[in-house]
């Protein structure tokens, strides 16, 4: 199987997960963590949640998608090399979007433990797709049925393709936030805000939406596995 076909299989799963996250993400829940606006200003933001979703949430998730796919390519570089994963540690972690979400006030030892868990996840992902890379089949699902058992295929999508596990286990060490320009969301109405920008910390809502989306996509993939292995 070609590397490109493995990438296509991962990207298909990732795209579905991101699309489902976009649908699941609630701006009103996320705004509970907004720092800056209050009272009528916050009410205006809630009323314009659709605009905030389109101009802020969707671009943020698209950025996450691009970086996750780029990170997977680095994982494949590791798999195809003879090196230990530690040789790829910095590149794998820095290419993805999660490490930059580790809070700056997290002690160095705690940060290292989080990074170690993230790296372990990517090592497991690399090991899980190795049989597909060496399979003679040309497509992702053909290689899956030829190279993996049903249980291995289910584990591939539910544990290795899934990406929220390390994030949810380390929730207290993470902070996902973005700075929003009021006029970018509300146009000229944004000029009445007490400050031109405000910060939204959306970690809880992001993890909630990503997890629910991920579970939906895993269920869909498992239905495909059931069909292929029956």
Image (cartoon, rainbow, N blue to C red):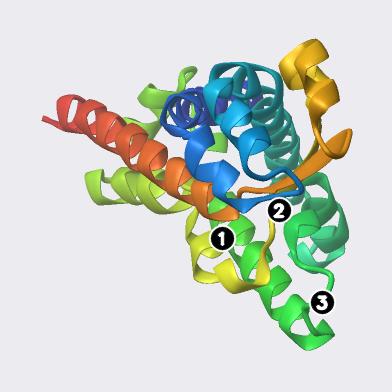
- Of tags 3 and 1, the one toward the viewer is 3
Q: Secondary structure at mark 1?
A: helix
Q: Which mark is residue 98?
A: 2
Number of numbered discs overlaid on the protein picture: 3
Q: Nearer the viewer, residue 92 or 209?
A: 209
At 54% from the left and 63% from the top, the residue drawn is: 166
Residue 195 lies in what quarter of the image?
top right
Residues at marks 2 and 1 touching, judged by CB atoms closer than 8 Å:
yes
Q: Secondary structure at mark 2?
A: loop
Q: Quadrant of the C terminus?
A: top left
Please tell me how crowded label 3 is: few (under 14), some (14-19), or many (20+) other residues with Cα within 10 Å: few
Q: Nearer the viewer, residue 52 or 159?
A: 52
At 56% from the left and 60% from the top, the residue drawn is: 167
How far apart, in angstroms, are the residues tagged by discs 2 and 1? 8 Å
Q: Which mark is residue 105?
A: 3
- 24 sits left or right of 133 in the view: left
Q: Nearer the viewer, residue 22 or 110?
A: 22
Please tell me how crowded label 2 is: few (under 14), some (14-19), or many (20+) other residues with Cα within 10 Å: some
Q: Secondary structure at mark 3?
A: loop
Residue 118 lies in what quarter of the image?
bottom right
How far apart, in angstroms, are the residues tagged by discs 3 and 1? 17 Å
How far apart, in angstroms, are the residues tagged by discs 2 and 3? 16 Å
Please tell me how crowded label 1 is: few (under 14), some (14-19), or many (20+) other residues with Cα within 10 Å: many
Residue 21: where, in percent of width, then height? 47, 32
Residue 83: where, in percent of width, then height? 81, 61
Residues at marks 3 and 1 touching, judged by CB atoms closer than 8 Å:
no
Q: Which mark is residue 188?
A: none
**Residue under pointer 1:** 167
Residue 80 lies in what quarter of the image?
top right
- Above-or-below relation of 30 to 40: below
- 51 sits left or right of 36 in the view: left
């Amino acid at each position: 199987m070609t590397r490109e076909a493995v990438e296509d299989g991962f990207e298909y799963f990732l795209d579905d997960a991101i699309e489902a996250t976009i649908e699941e993400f609630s701006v009103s829940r996320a705004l509970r963590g907004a720092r800056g606006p209050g009272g009528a200003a916050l009410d205006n933001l809630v009323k314009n949640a659709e605009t905030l979703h389109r101009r802020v949430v969707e671009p943020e998730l698209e950025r996450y998608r691009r970086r996750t796919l780029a990170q997977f390519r680095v994982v494949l570089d590791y798999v195809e090399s003879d090196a230990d994963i530690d040789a790829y540690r910095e590149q794998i972690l820095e290419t993805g979007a999660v490490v930059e979400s580790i809070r700056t006030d997290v002690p160095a030892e705690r940060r290292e433990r989080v990074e170690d868990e993230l790296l372990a996840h990517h090592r497991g992902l690399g090991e899980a797709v190795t049989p597909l890379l060496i399979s003679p089949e040309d497509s992702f699902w053909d290689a899956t049925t030829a190279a993996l058992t049903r249980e291995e295929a289910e584990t591939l999508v539910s544990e290795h393709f899934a990406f929220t596990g390390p994030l949810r286990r380390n929730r207290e060490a993470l902070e996902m936030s973005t700075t929003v320009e009021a006029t970018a969301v509300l146009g000229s109405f944004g000029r009445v805000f007490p400050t031109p920008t405000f910060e939204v910390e959306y970690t809880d809502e992001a993890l909630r939406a990503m997890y629910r989306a991920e579970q939906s996509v895993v269920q869909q993939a498992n239905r495909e596995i059931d069909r292929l292995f029956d």
